[in-house]
Image (cartoon, grey):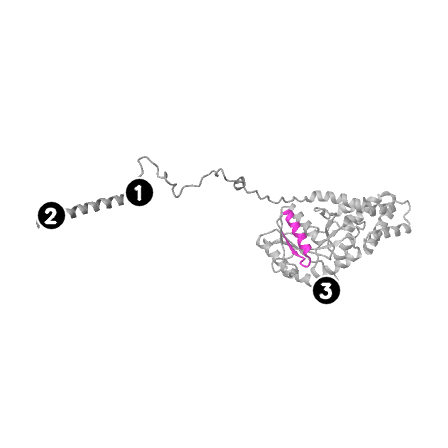
Amino acid sequence: MDAILLLILAIAVVAIALVAVVTGLVVSGRRKPEPLPGASADVLAPPEEAEAPTEAPAETSAEAVAPAPAVEEPVLERPEGTASRLVRLRQRLAGSQGGLGRGLLALLSRDRLDEDTWESIEDTLLTADVGVGPTQELVERLRTRLRVAGATEDPRSVLREELLALVDPDLDRRLQVSGLDGMPGVVLVVGVNGSGKTTTVGKISRILVAEDRSVVLGAADTFRAAAVEQLATWGERVGVDVVRGPEGTDPASVAFEAVKEGVETKADTVIVDTAGRLQNKAGLMDELGKVKRVIEKQAPVTEVLLVLDATTGQNGLIQARVFSEVVNVTGIVLTKLDGSAKGGIVVQVQRELGVPVKLVGLGEGADDLAPFDAGAFVDALLG
């Protein structure tokens, strides 16, 4: 019996030993091998934080690694300065207005200034749109001076002095484009259809940009999509922001937003283009008054410029009166003066409104707008 127990015990010991050996082999088969002495840890796989290869694989196409094309910044135009504009003012006016001065000088240089000659002088001035009142005043002063001086005074010098007095060189022709207390200057531009308002707004912005002023434009002529697009183009050319709204938007709201942006961005000047209005349409004129009132909830209007076509003559004066009653015009812009021999409109419109001509349009070019200079104008009249 004891022998049997010993045999069973021996068999159990052997079995346990066999199980231990098998179990050890299985565990050893599942254990990862220890790295070899001196071997790096990335022999089998790159570490998780390894950087991507800096060079593209050979099979990568040229298009995949080509750099993205650089986005070119729009090249802004540098507008012409005021000095060179004035030089061109003299040249252009001399070419288009010289006929009036030459005609007057020819008459005043006659050996005998009889009544027929003075009547011819009056007719010449009236034809040039100087107006009845200014014409009579000028003729009377010329008669008095030349009668007293006789042959001792040069008719040209006398005529120049009297024409200059008629144009009035003492009027303040500065554009009020600056506000007070950090507010922007606000320029409201008004006029009838076809007078050149939108173009004038764009050209004024160029004058201000040339003087390193920051400008915001308000496209409040919302009834003409073409006018809004035209103004946007003017702004893009010199890097000026243009505030606009959908076609048919209330013009007053666009004007309000333009001035608001000018206040928030601390712009120097905001210029608001308005819809061309017929002076005999009461509703449209009332709306123009509304635009001005709404603007002034943000900042005072510092300048109201009335744009007139210099070739319209008496009709332009009728327009001027009505606009002045609605929005208190502070300055006149005469367009197309280079193509008209009727420069006397300068004198007549100033007399009619009691406000100065501040700018004159001299052509179709982007910088063909210049500050009005009384001396240059009279010299141009005399040729």
- Find out whether residue 233 is within the magenta segment: yes
Q: Please give the residue where the numbered disc 1 appears in the rendered image.
A: 32
Q: Position of residue 244 (x, y in %)?
A: 63, 56
Q: Please give the residue where the numbered disc 2 appears in the rendered image.
A: 6
Marks 2 and 1, how far apart at CA:
41 Å
Label 1 SS: loop
Marks 1 and 3, how far apart at CA:
97 Å
Q: Earlier in the sequence, mark 2 or mark 1?
A: 2
User: Is residue 9 at all visible to an observer of this figure?
Assistant: yes
Label 3 SS: helix
Provide the residue span drawn in magenta.
216-238
183 vs 334, nearest the viewer: 334
Label 3 CA crowd tier, 10 Å (few <14, some 14–19, many 20+):
few
Q: Position of residue 228 (x, y in %)?
A: 66, 55
Label 2 SS: helix
Q: Earlier in the sequence, mark 1 or mark 3?
A: 1
Marks 2 and 3, how far apart at CA:
132 Å
Label 1 CA crowd tier, 10 Å (few <14, some 14–19, many 20+):
few
* Residue situated furthest left in the rendering: 2
Q: Please give the residue where the numbered disc 3 appears in the rendered image.
A: 282
Q: Position of residue 311 (x, y in %)?
A: 79, 53
